[in-house]
Amino acid sequence: MSATDGITLDDYIRNIPDFPKPGIQFKDITPLLSHPEAFRAAVERLAAPFADRGVDAIAAAEARGFLFAAPMAMTLGVGLVPIRKPGKLPFTTVSAEYALEYGNDRLEMHSDALEPGRRILVVDDVLATGGTMKACCDLVRNAGAEVVACAFLIELGFLKGREKLEPYEVFSLLSY
Ligand code: PRP
Ligand code: MG
């Protein structure tokens, strides 16, 4: 029994119609972040399935991925590897491209961030098309490390991001 057992995470996700553009319903996580018990429950429930999976480190993409990855790393007692938008990391980087609605974008990771064979849990707030997470997994794999699983607070099932991430294990707490 944990103090957060009674928390329903969905109660802390706010729907914002027509953001960032007409027809899109945005899942706003700020209510969850502002309620300490709900935030704690989310972090505990995201981390718990991986406590005995031999995870060596968590990797996550800025910005919203960091919000969950950092407390999860503390919970699991492992380090955190930041994956960032281009030009933000100071040391030598490796990069992976991913598709946006119009054109491509890129994510970067320090070239010495992961040793070959390390077992990595990759974390983000939302799985939409899967492009961001696929790029993160490409960075992990290209470094010779292993993706244990991809973990998300929210999965937007209708966008089929899970298919893009095959054959990686995908875990999400909330599906819409
Ligand atoms: C959002 C979200 C995920 C990604 C999901 O990040 O935080 O990282 O989109 O979309 P996808 O599955 O289609 O790739 P965004 O790029 O908006 O940036 P942010 O985290 O810096 O807000
Ligand atoms: Mg993001």
Image: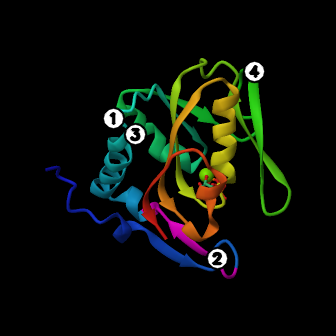
Whether residue 87 is situated above or below residue 101 in the rendered picture:
above
Q: Nearer the viewer, mark 3 or mark 1?
A: 1
First in sequence: mark 4 or mark 3?
Answer: 3
First in sequence: mark 1 or mark 2?
Answer: 2
Q: Nearer the viewer, mark 1 or mark 2?
A: 1
Seen at 62% across and 49% down, the residue is: 166
Quadrant observed for ligand 1 in the rendered image: bottom right
Whether residue 16 is situated above or below residue 113 in the rendered picture:
below
- The amino acid type found where label 2 is placed reads Ile
Residue topped by disc 1? 51
Q: Disc 4 versus disc 3: distance between alpha carbons?
A: 26 Å
x and y, in percent, of residue 122 in the image: 53, 40
Residue topped by disc 2? 24
Residue topped by disc 4? 92
Label 2's element?
loop
- The amino acid type found where label 3 is placed reads Pro
Q: Disc 2 versus disc 3: distance between alpha carbons?
A: 29 Å
Range covered by the magenta-colored residues:
22-30
Residue at the extreme left of the image, as rendered: 1
Residue topped by disc 3? 71
